[in-house]
Image (tube, rainbow, N blue to C red):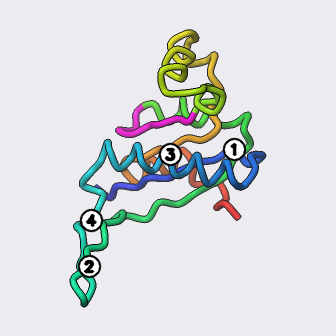
Amino acid sequence: MSFKPVIILADDLPIGLKANFAAVLGMSLGQLCPDLVGADTPTQDSVQIAGITTVALPILCAPAADLPALFEAAADLPVRLAYMRAAFEARDYADYTTRIAAAPLTGHEPQAILLAGPRKAVDRTCGRLPLLR
């Protein structure tokens, strides 16, 4: 099986928020799938450079209104993460968890999502989306 992760960002976000949300989702992917992070590599002068991803991680865009449907369409994928509006509005992680717990999934607005799984399944869900530019 060819494993493919993608990040999909709301296309109306400012570039700084897009970069931040993609970084946050990438950190979560690294925690969930540590095997996607390669081994540390020494430079010629023995300085250790921490491992980076061993797979490509395309960053795509979609209208914000499409993100809930994309997230739902990916329900069967092994990895499905969302950066909800509640995360952006929260003061800290405790506030975030309180906000998330206070509403059903349909009451939250994803600002960015990360989907990962078999390449064909991921492509069926988001293969038509453009790369972030």
Q: Is residue 36 above or below residue 89?
A: below
Q: In the visual, does 125 lie left or right of 15? A: left
Query: Residue 24 — which label?
Result: 3
The reply to whether dot 3 and dot 4 touch (C-beta < 8 Å) is no
Determine crowd level at label 2: few under 14, some 14-19, many 20+ residues with C-alpha closer than 10 A: few
Tell which of 129 and 16 is nearer to you. 16
- Distance from label 4 to label 2 (Cα)? 16 Å
| Between discs 1 and 4, the one toward the N terminus | 1
Using the rendered image of the protein, determine whether residue 63 is visible from the camera's viewpoint: yes
Report if residue 99 lies within the magenta region: no
Report if residue 80 lies within the magenta region: yes
Q: Is residue 4 above or below residue 113?
A: below
The reply to whether dot 2 and dot 1 touch (C-beta < 8 Å) is no
- Distance from label 2 to label 1 (Cα)? 38 Å
Residue 19: x and y in percent read: 61, 54
Mark in the foreground, 4 or 2:
2
- As shown in the figure, which amino acid type bears the numbered disc 2? Val
Q: SS for tag 4?
A: loop
Q: Which residue is mark 4?
A: 38
Determine crowd level at label 3: few under 14, some 14-19, many 20+ residues with C-alpha closer than 10 A: some
Using the rendered image of the protein, determine whether residue 68 is visible from the camera's viewpoint: no
Q: Is residue 64 above or below residue 98?
A: below
Query: Residue 47 — which label?
Result: 2
Mark in the foreground, 1 or 4:
4
| Between discs 3 and 1, the one toward the N terminus | 1
Q: Which residue is mark 1?
A: 10
Residue 30: x and y in percent read: 35, 50
Mark in the foreground, 3 or 1:
3
- As shown in the figure, which amino acid type bears the numbered disc 3? Val
Determine crowd level at label 4: few under 14, some 14-19, many 20+ residues with C-alpha closer than 10 A: few
